[in-house]
Image (cartoon, rainbow, N blue to C red):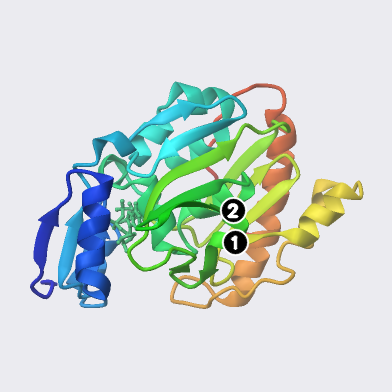
Amino acid sequence: MIPASFTYRRAGSADEALDLAAEHGDDAKFLAGGHSLLPLMKLRLAAPEVLIDLAGLRDLSYVSDRGDHVAIGALTRHHDVEHSDLLIREIPLLAHAAGEVGDPQIRHRGTIGGSVAHGDPASDLPGVLLALDATFVARGSDGSREIPASEFFESLFETALRPGELLTEIRVPKPSATGWSFQKFTQRAIDWAIVGVAVQGGNVALINMGATPLRATGVEQALASGASPADAAAHAAEGTTAPADIRASTAYREHLARILTRRALIEAQLSLTTRYFPPPPITPRVE
Ligand SMILES: Cc1cc2nc3c(=O)[nH]c(=O)nc-3n(C[C@H](O)[C@H](O)[C@H](O)COP(=O)(O)OP(=O)(O)OC[C@H]3O[C@@H](n4cnc5c(N)ncnc54)[C@H](O)[C@@H]3O)c2cc1C
């Protein structure tokens, strides 16, 4: 559980971080909250020679109203997303889901940008941001570009970020359809989702049902055709490639996807009655 030796460099600005990344190339990795990268390094599944610490980039920690969307700096910690008055008011799905990540210690260190850049299909916020039609802003040596969430997650732990590119901002449109729900099925509260479902209006995203977070297009099409939550949710596992592991078989995950989607769609309808309706925790139950 001891990582291979590495050189530690602390960036004072985004420019400095990009310069250091260009200088060290494939040998370097950015370090944000460290709550995904450091465990991998301890297991020797990652062995960067240089760590570029982003903790000094305080100007990339913000939640800001930009009219039709909310902009969130990549270095914003999960705790600050969870407790942002702006997000609670305008995009409660995201604030609520951030409060479901790990435990308080993890939420005080982990960052939204780190979670997105890591590209773990079991993580909560990538799936939620996919349901919210977010856009990610990446900055490289040749300037900034915008990447829609639908094009960002390419495969297991692979994203559209190019080597040395820094994720700087997440832009989330203020939803026009306000019904939302986040369902996360875990064995222990701290765990990653065995399966998760995020619903915003007619958008439905699945967590841990494939190599990337997925939009449940079969469910979305059924909803658009006027199907009931129960009938639409029956399509939840279509087109998925759920993993099998020590916690669940593929078939069990497919079952959970259908059950959780049905609950999420019903809860999203109920949440229309109030702007912020934190759902109660789900008692694990199989139907
Ligand atoms: C015990 C435990 C339980 C957890 N439970 C959950 C959970 O229930 N749900 C969940 O979603 N997550 C969970 N996590 C993960 C947690 O949310 C992490 O904080 C998050 O996944 C990564 O964010 P980070 O800031 O720590 O990133 P880091 O670990 O610092 O970085 C992760 C990767 O992203 C890259 N990176 C980071 N920031 C940038 C950037 N701005 N631009 C480009 N690349 C960047 C790094 O180089 C690295 O490859 C858990 C972690 C632990 C240790």
The quadrant of the picture occupied by the N terminus is bottom left
Indicate the secondary structure of the residue bearing disc 1.
helix
Give the residue displayed 10% in from the left and 70% down from the top: 6
Give the residue displayed 63% in from the left and 48% down from the top: 131
Q: Which residue is mark 1?
A: 151
Q: Which mark is residue 148?
A: 2
Query: For the residue carrying disc 2, how many other residues have a C-alpha within 10 Å: few (<14), some (14-19), or many (20+)?
Result: some
Indicate the secondary structure of the residue bearing disc 2.
strand
Q: Quadrant of ligand 1?
A: bottom left
Query: For the residue carrying disc 1, how many other residues have a C-alpha within 10 Å: few (<14), some (14-19), or many (20+)?
Result: few
Depth check: give the residue in front, 107 or 166. 166
Depth check: give the residue in front, 203 or 113. 113
Q: Is residue 280 visible?
A: yes
Residue 276: quarter of image = top right
Q: Which mark is residue 272?
A: none
Q: Are marks 2 and 1 in contact (CB under 8 Å)?
A: yes
Q: Position of residue 23 (x, y in %)?
A: 20, 66
Q: Position of residue 181 (x, y in %)?
A: 63, 40
User: Type of residue at label 2?
Assistant: Pro
> Relative to residue 119, is residue 227 drawn left or right?
right
Residue 116 higher or lower than 210, as above or below: above
Residue 28 higher or lower than 131, as above or below: below
Q: Position of residue 116 (x, y in %)?
A: 44, 55
Residue 157 higher or lower than 178, as above or below: below
Q: CA distance from mark 2 to mark 1?
A: 5 Å
